[in-house]
Image: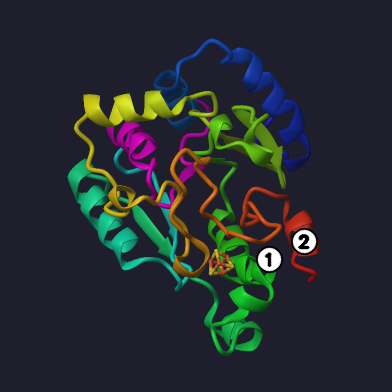
Amino acid sequence: MSFLDPDLSGPWAAVLADRYARADSVSLLRAMILDVFPGRITLVSSFGAESAVLLHMVSRIDPDLPVVFIDTGKLFGETKRYRDQLTRHLGLRNLQIITPDPARLKAQDPDGMLFSRKPDACCFWRKVEPLERALAGYGAWISGRKQFHGGARADLQRFEAVDKRIKISPLAGWTRDQIAAYFTAHDLPPHPLEGEGYLSIGCMPCTARAESGASVRSGRWQGLDKTECGIHLSLSEARKRANL
Ligand code: SF4
């Protein structure tokens, strides 16, 4: 089997899940970056409240690994400043900031208010489509999702095959306490909005503070029947959800 054969991504995900079933998160990451997908893997990071854990691990394995950050044009300034601070702090040398296609945005979201009318379409043009472009040529990408986030993530596995690529979630089984302990152990700076009650941090119009004791992602798209932006769906599912 070859990772260059797109039709075999599904079987490969199962093979990798089996082969690395007992590997801890750092060992798993090291194997994926250095041995299994050298030169063909990237970390996609929102530089959100928990992102520093994976970014720190990656920085210790390969500081030149491409780190993809989607600047939707609707982010908190704090997130962008945190991104730059953390990138410097960890010595990451290959941050790739991607943005929506300006012509597409002009056509699809001319007043910048699509989020209030059709949030799934807004996410598609500001997140899904730019990421799809950025992932062209990669055989695998790393995601920071965890099961304790709940909802569609509750059954998250460490390896998935999506759109002919392998998606790897090394922290899938981690708990909130483990995340907090890792921050402490490695003296990682927190996202500045976390101290203001934001537990999951995305775009400004679609992110609110979480109520005390509420689930981590309860502040995202509050009041809407929406819990994910669509980058973790297949491209066809994301299009369907956005009515495109
Ligand atoms: S999170 Fe909100 S503002 Fe950001 S892309 Fe999605 S709908 Fe648009």
Above or below residue 15? Residue 70 is: below
The three-letter amino acid code for the residue at tag 1 is Asp
Tag count? 2
What residue is at 47 percent from the left and 22 percent from the top?
28
Answer yes or no: is residue 79 visible. Answer: yes
Residue assigned mark 1: 120
Q: Position of residue 31 (x, y in %)?
A: 46, 23
Looking at the rendering, the quadrant in which ligand 1 lies is bottom right
What residue is at 39 percent from the left and 23 percent from the top?
178
Name the foreground residue: 208 vs 52: 208
Tell me the quarter of the image containing the N terminus.
top right
Q: Position of residue 141 (x, y in %)?
A: 54, 42
Q: Does residue 45 appear left or right of residue 61 in this picture?
A: right
Label 1, ligand 1: CB separation under 8 Å: yes
What residue is at 69 percent from the left and 27 percent from the top?
12
Above or below residue 63? Residue 25 is: above
Residue assigned mark 2: 241
Q: CA distance from mark 2 to mark 1?
A: 7 Å
